[in-house]
Image (tube, coloured by chain):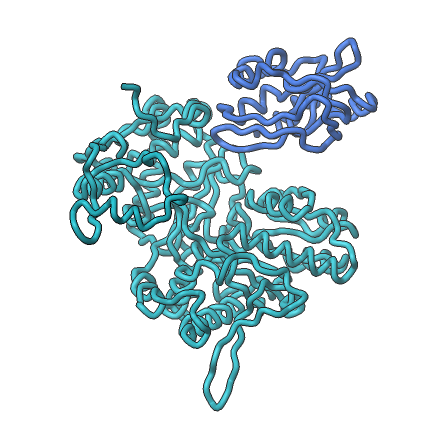
Chain colours: A blue, B cyan
């Protein structure tokens, strides 16, 4: 499993990537999609919704279980990945690029510093796998 | 009998949808009077209430109707077919005496609109059942109204909210829920306007009282805790946790889903629980699965009794005789929770079960449920990974960790077990354990039946190392082999549509 170096990570297995325009793209990690298994349902917020760091911004359901999605930063949702509406398999095939979920304009970009970097996250996953 | 021979293939008929059996003009009923009396019967209904188009109902005769449902029933697997070790669901045998009692005419012919005088027997039974549940739980105020466990949770937290509101003028906004809770607990919080504060269990699989100290603020209404929890472990620190919650003015909600392992041995009320629900359809052996109906009575402490739903059943002693009546007036009550008095048929069955067994019998239920779960755990321990390897209560949790190296996962084990004629255990729950298989054998399985289940589990583990493909493509002996679960969940066809002519 891979964890891109330039991404930041939550303990709840979301990733966050800062783009050049300052917006933050959010998705779930390779570990998360693998642990969930085959995904059958996804609920995401709408454009314009406000999400708060640590609060749920959506729900993901697989053939195994249902899990909440937790926002890595606070801010306004400026874009939602429409591709996922019909093609949930993308989450399993390419969780870090094509499988992105929402784009958030953060209210406080310092919040990103509170997230884990790739090596810290990999350590967490290692502990969970034990 | 060899475990391989436990399940066999047999002739089972394919059966189309009943709509596909339909032939215009066939019917399985007769109306009074002349054979062509249907039109006359319709005329009795005023024109404005008559539908203008024919309903799309299947037209079959009686024998086809009977065969249709009999054939479908033969595809089924239930507790009457074989063991059903579905963890957290308590799929135990439903004693037939319950059914005999529930079919007594005095109960079946009653109607909630009958005057109280005609319903004395039913009211007496309900009053007695409330008393029994109060004694079993140590929570003296009981309502039988809620229709199922989750409905009982809703009722209980509603009472908590109302009690806080009345005492402080502020219902508070948060609720503590451990990671070993049932999924209904967070949902109940949401339904009652509380946000959830999660607390992780410790390395022994239970909640630490120390972790509650920091979370239990003035804005927390209380805690919803399941004991034993969904790992099948006894919450040893519950009295300390309750003391912390109470000191901050909060309440302890006890999820009664696992009461099967406490009967006659421990009373939630004595452990510090203020409010709990009883799943009559689990612990008290009323039928469930496939829609129930369930029954989720709620018990509360004496201090909270005045908040219970109305009507309450009261007893009056007059001229040496006892009569029962319904009391509606109570300004403190949270109000009605369900029409009439709950799922009455279930109440009769639960009453029959309690009376049949008595206090000693109920204690034996719990002792056997706990013994059976530990017996299964002992049989699996060397072959399956046990995340919290200690004495369990009425259920045990193992995982697929040792099978990962051959690419076999929990779901594959579950599917292969079907080939040996067992309903699979609960899978991937509780969520705090990766790849969980949660096994609840219940007290009604014999030692032979438990031995067969363990042997099947060990055989499946052995097969996974020798021939993993056998598991990955299981089940093989069922009418339909492994489903495409993603398509089944995403492309559902739930409604019959006739083919275009």
Q: Quadrant of residue A90?
A: top right
Depth order, front residue of B75/B263:
B75
Quadrant of residue B244 within the rendered picture: bottom right
Quadrant of image for the C terminus of chain B: top left
Indicate the position of residue B390 as horizontal and vertical percent values: 52, 48
Q: Quadrant of residue B159?
A: bottom right
Decide if residue B417 is on the left or right side of residue B151: left
Left or right of residue B219, residue B9 in this image: left
Is A1 positioned to the left or the right of B291 in the image?
right
Q: Residue furthest bottom?
A: B319
- Could you say which is closer to the camera, residue A71 or residue B155? B155
The percent coordinates of residue B315 (x first, y second) are 52, 78
For the point 37% across and 39% down, the residue is: B51
Query: What percent of the width, then of the height, locates residue B20?
Result: 25, 29
Residue B118, relative to residue B490: is it above or below? below
Residue drawn at x 26%, y 42% is B73
Asked whether residue B118 is in view, the answer is: yes
Tell me what residue is drawn at x 30 percent, y 19 percent.
B500
Relative image position of residue B119 (x, y in whole percent): 42, 72
Looking at this view, is B20 or B77 the one in front?
B20
């Amino acid at each position: 499993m891979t964890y891109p170096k330039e991404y930041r990570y939550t303990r709840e297995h979301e990733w966050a990537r800062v783009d050049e325009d300052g917006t933050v793209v959010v998705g779930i990690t390779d570990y998360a999609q693998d642990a969930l298994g085959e995904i059958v349902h996804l609920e995401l917020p709408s454009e314009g919704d406000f999400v708060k760091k640590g609060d749920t911004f959506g729900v993901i359901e697989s053939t195994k279980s249902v899990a909440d999605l937790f926002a890595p930063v606070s801010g306004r949702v400026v874009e939602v990945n429409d591709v996922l509406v019909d093609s949930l398999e993308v989450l399993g095939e390419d969780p870090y690029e094509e499988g992105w979920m929402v784009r958030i304009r953060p209210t406080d970009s310092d919040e990103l510093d509170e997230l884990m970097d790739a090596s810290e996250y990999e350590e967490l996953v290692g502990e969970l796998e034990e | 009998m060899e475990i391989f021979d436990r399940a066999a293939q047999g002739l089972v008929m394919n059966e189309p949808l009943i709509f596909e059996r339909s032939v215009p003009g066939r019917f399985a009923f007769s109306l009074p009077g002349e054979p062509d009396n249907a039109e006359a019967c319709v005329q009795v209904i005023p024109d404005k209430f008559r539908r203008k188009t024919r309903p799309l109902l299947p037209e079959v005769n009686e024998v086809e109707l009977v065969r249709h449902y009999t054939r479908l029933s033969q595809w089924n697997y239930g507790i009457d077919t074989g063991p059903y070790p579905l963890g957290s669901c308590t799929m135990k045998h439903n004693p037939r005496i319950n059914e005999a009692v529930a079919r007594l005419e005095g109960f079946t012919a009653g109607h909630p609109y009958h005057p109280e005088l005609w319903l004395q027997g039913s009211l007496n039974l309900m009053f007695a059942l409330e008393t029994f549940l109060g004694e079993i739980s140590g929570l003296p105020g009981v309502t039988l109204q809620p229709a199922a466990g989750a409905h009982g949770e809703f009722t209980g937290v509603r009472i908590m909210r109302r009690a806080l509101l009345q005492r402080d003028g502020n219902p508070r906004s948060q609720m503590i829920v451990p990671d070993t809770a049932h999924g209904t607990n967070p949902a109940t919080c949401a339904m009652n306007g509380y946000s959830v504060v999660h607390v992780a269990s410790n390395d022994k699989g239970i909640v630490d009282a120390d972790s509650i100290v920091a979370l239990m603020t003035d804005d927390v209404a209380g805690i919803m805790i399941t004991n034993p929890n969904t790992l099948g472990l006894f919450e040893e620190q519950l009295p300390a946790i309750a003391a912390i919650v109470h000191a901050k003015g909060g309440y302890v909600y006890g999820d009664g889903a696992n009461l099967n392992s406490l009967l006659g041995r421990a009373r939630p009320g004595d452990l510090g629980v203020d409010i709990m629900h009883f799943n009559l359809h689990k612990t008290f052996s009323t039928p469930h699965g496939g829609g129930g109906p369930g029954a989720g009575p709620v018990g509360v402490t004496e201090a909270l009794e005045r908040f219970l739903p109305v009507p309450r059943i009261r007893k009056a002693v007059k001229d040496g005789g006892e009569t029962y009546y319904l009391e509606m007036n109570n300004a403190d009550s949270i109000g009605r929770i369900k029409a009439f008095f709950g799922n009455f048929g279930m109440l009769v069955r639960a009453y029959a079960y309690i009376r049949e067994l008595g206090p000693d019998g109920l204690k034996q239920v719990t002792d056997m449920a706990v013994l059976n779960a530990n017996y299964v755990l002992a049989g699996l321990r060397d072959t399956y990974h046990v995340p919290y390897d200690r004495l369990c209560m009425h259920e045990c949790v193992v995982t697929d960790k040792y099978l990962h190296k051959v690419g076999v996962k929990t779901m594959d084990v579950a599917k292969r077990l079907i080939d040996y004629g067992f309903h699979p255990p609960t899978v991937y729950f509780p969520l705090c354990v990766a790849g969980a298989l949660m096994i609840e054998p219940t007290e009604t399985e014999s030692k032979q039946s438990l031995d067969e289940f363990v042997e099947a589990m060990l055989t499946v583990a052995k097969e996974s190392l020798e021939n993993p493909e056998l598991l990955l493509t299981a089940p093989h002996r069922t009418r339909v082999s492994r489903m495409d679960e993603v398509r089944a969940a995403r492309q559902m066809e739930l409604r019959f549509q006739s083919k275009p002519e």
